[in-house]
Amino acid sequence: MNALIVIDVQNDFCPNGALAVEGGHEIVALINVRMNQYNTVIMTQDWHPRMHMSFADNHNVEPYSVIEVDYGAQVLWPRHCVEGSEGAEFHPLLDSRRADAIIRKGFRKEIDSYSAFFENDKKTPTGLEGYLRGRRIDSVDFVGLATDFCVSWSAIDAAKLGFHARVLLPLTRAIDLDGSLEKAINDMKQAGVEIVND
Ligand code: VGL
Ligand code: ZN
């Protein structure tokens, strides 16, 4: 059984959003069509409290500064995807009615969560693994935003957990901070994620 996992296609990651990813909106129509090829569709939503540790202004520093925390390096972002805000809603044209499950992540203020499977400590589970195993899903395709953060971290965790994991690159867009896209693609290949270019 297969699943399409649609990562963080939310207003704040699209043009005019708080953490806009270039061309983020361009993938929405393609994702809507692609959903028809899967038994199961799962969507994730980045969902942060106002006082979240990943927000630069909660540390009084410039966005995109990097700090060291218990679990390693953490980029500090512009305030984005605040729980219940319009920026945290799915892009209005994304067919979210098709989602069998919606996973929210990053909702604890002490820790960020890029991956759909584990928070950034790489050990606190979100419950997605159990959901997939319960539904007998062994093959997962990833699309959405952003290629080099939440998409790649999710795909790498999926491969490490033993799922057949693919990233459909044309249905993703990247933030690309200091070469982070190239690094993410190398890391994904290293972890056994299949990169689909067309
Ligand atoms: C994301 C940075 C911060 C993402 C989420 O969805 O890739 N990136 N929060
Ligand atoms: Zn976030």
Image (tube, rainbow, N blue to C red):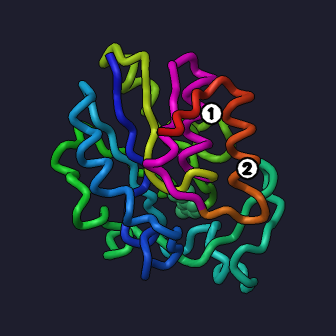
Question: Which sits earlier in the primary sequence, circle 1 or circle 2?
Answer: 1
- Which mark, residue 190? none
Instruction: Work out whether 85 lies above or below 46.
Output: below
In magenta segment, residue 42: no
Q: Nearer the viewer, mark 1 or mark 2?
A: 2
Counting from the top left corner in percent of width and height, residue 126 is at: 48, 38
Query: How many marks are shown on the rendered structure?
Result: 2
Q: What stretch is highlighted in magenta?
A: 149-174
- Disc 2, SS: helix
Residue at left offset 77%, top offset 74%: 65
Identify which residue, 44 or 1, lies in the foreground: 1
- Examine the rendering and report whether any part of residue 109 can be seen: no
Apparent side of residue 5 relative to residue 78 in the rendered image (left or right): left
Counting from the top left corner in percent of width and height, residue 172 is at: 48, 51
Residue at left offset 81%, top offset 66%: 67
Residue at left offset 61%, top offset 28%: 193
When asked about the image quadrant of residue 123, the answer is top right
Q: Mark 2 points at which residue?
A: 182
- Disc 1, SS: helix
Counting from the top left corner in percent of width and height, residue 40 is at: 26, 29
Three-letter code for the amino acid on which mark 2 is drawn: Glu
- Which mark, residue 156? 1
Apparent side of residue 173 relative to residue 102 in the rendered image (left or right): right
- Examine the rendering and report whether any part of residue 75 can be seen: yes
